[in-house]
Amino acid sequence: MTKIRSPEEFQNDILYLLQRFRWGTPTVLEEYLRKHVTQEGALVYAREHCVFAANFPRWLANITGNCPHLEVRKYLIENMFVEEVKDPTIPTGHYESLVDFCVAVGGDREYIYGYSGAAVTRMRITYCDWVSRHKPWLEAFAAIAGNEVARGKEMIKRVGERAHTSRKTWASLNLSKEALAHWDAADSADSGDDGHGDAPLYFLKKYADTREKQDACLAAMKERQEVNRIWADQVGVWAFEASGLKPPSLDGRQVLLLKAAQAA
């Protein structure tokens, strides 16, 4: 039997996995956001991200309902409260501030509220629904809440500013402070002290108390990143095209991703 990882070893494996699969090779969307942002492309991204963000608290709720540990449920409920009731860093709601951003780059507010997402967005949502409802709570937590670790302080130490959620991404659009409020709030929530980007590490290290649980959590996190990359590559292509630019080819990208997953 392979021995259990120490808490330090497990945290390092989590961070290495996210560094490799989330940040190792830039997605097409990241390439777009780093170098080519226009209002038209920002709208493509924002519209899809609004749909995803509207569903995120439901997955936290699903995990909460299956979790037997009070301290974890408190954390998940606090996270949901920030998402859906009161974000302490901005006057508007967390989701509403994202809609404000989408409107600022050309979206219609009522259309955004009713929009159900492109097929690739609906597939991403369906995956997260499945994980949060049907996987054991700890694996679901690793996949859903653990995804925020990719934006936390520990990840920023490894990959630098790439991991920050920052209003600087949209600097070329010259938007108002109010239009960009969501990105300040997201950065504060995920990358601040004891934020959502680091807190999951504590719970994963505490409750993944066998090698089998640790392995299952890592597998869930890797699978989530694979789904994220498929979405980010396709949305990135659309953002390039909306900006009147030729996007990088998707040929072979999933083959490379599959090889990386098999080697991990």
Image: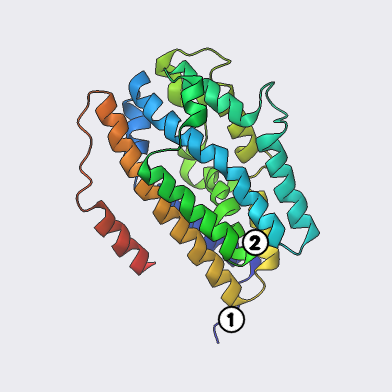
Residue 204 shows which numbered tag?
2
Quadrant in the picture for residue 234: top left
Dot 2 or dot 1: first in sequence order is 1
Q: Which label sits on residue 3?
A: 1
Is residue 23 shown above or below 15? above
User: Of the residues tagged 2 and 1, which is closer to the observer?
Assistant: 2
Quadrant hosting residue 244: top left
Q: Nearer the viewer, residue 191 or 130?
A: 130
The image position of residue 254, as x and y in percent, is 28, 55
Q: Residue drawn at (65%, 66%), measured in percent from left and top?
A: 7
Residue at horizontal 52 percent and vertical 36 percent from the top: 164
Tell me the residue at 57%/76% (across/down).
Answer: 212
Q: Residues within 10 Å of mark 2 (few under 14, many from 20)?
A: many
The image shows residue 195 at horizontal and vertical percentages of 67, 42
Position of residue 52 measured from the top left corner of the image (x, y, whole percent): 50, 40
Comparing 19 with 95, the one in front is 95
The amino acid type found where label 2 is placed reads Leu
Crowding near pointer 1: few (<14 within 10 Å), some, many (20+)? few
Mark 2 in CB contact with mark 1 (< 8 angstroms) = no
Left or right, residue 28 beside residue 73: left
